[in-house]
Amino acid sequence: MTRIPWDERYSVPDPHIDDQHKVLVALVNDVFEARARGWAVEERRNLLGLILSFLDKHFHDEEVLMRRAGYPGLPVQEAEHRRILAEFHRRLHEGPVPRPRTLDWVAEGVEAHFLEFDAPMAAWLREHPAEPEPGDAG
């Protein structure tokens, strides 16, 4: 697998979540660059750990948005988020060193999640905008 180029198909009609998707693609690409230059074990663990932490926050934010929009696919998304985080955690800690194939799993998984799970959510949000959070000016 190679770097993931940004694709508008990964976009969602919420600026905060959309920005998080762009950051996630950039983080995955940072790991590819580190691997290409012969990353050290500690760098591998740190970068993959950073992605795992970011995903945890991102999934939370995404679920809040889906809840506010009344998205009917929320239970499926929540289950998928839990599955991804558990598998990522397992892979990150499966031995003394995260295996290089974990990066390929992350990259493929991010892209697949965007297209299989987030694209339907984005379509729903275009038709059913989320209610503003309490205290939002707009």
Image: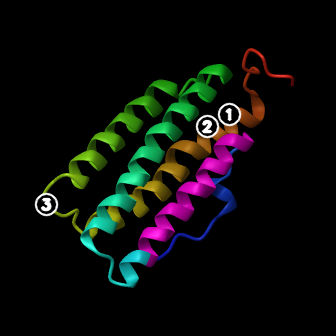
Which secondary structure type mostly characterizes the magenta part of the structure?
Answer: helix
Q: Amino acid at mark 3?
A: Pro
Identify the residue at image location x=34%, y=41%. 85
Query: Can you say whether 22 is above or below 2 in the image?
Result: above
**Which numbered disc covers residue 73?**
none
Identify the residue at image location x=29%, y=60%. 45
**Residue 69, position as x, y percentages in the image:** 67, 23
Query: Can you say whether 2 is above or below 7 in the image?
Result: below
Q: Are marks 1 and 3 in contact (CB under 8 Å)?
A: no
Q: Nearer the viewer, residue 35 or 74?
A: 35
Mark 3: secondary structure? loop
Quarter of the picture holding the C terminus: top right
Q: Are marks 2 and 3 in contact (CB under 8 Å)?
A: no
Q: Which residue is mark 2?
A: 121
Q: Which residue is mark 1?
A: 124
Give the mark, 1 or 3, whose residue is nearer the N terminus: 3
Identify the residue at image location x=57%, y=34%. 62
Q: Quadrant of residue 84?
A: top left
Q: Quadrant of residue 107?
A: bottom left
Query: Can you say whether 8 is above or below 134 in the image?
Result: below
Quarter of the picture holding the N terminus: bottom left
Question: Which color scheme does this rendered protein use?
Answer: rainbow
Tell me, yes or no, if residue 54 can be seen here. yes
Q: Amino acid at mark 2?
A: Met
Q: Residues within 10 Å of mark 2 (few under 14, many from 20)?
A: many
Q: Amino acid at mark 1?
A: Trp
Q: Which residue is mark 3?
A: 96
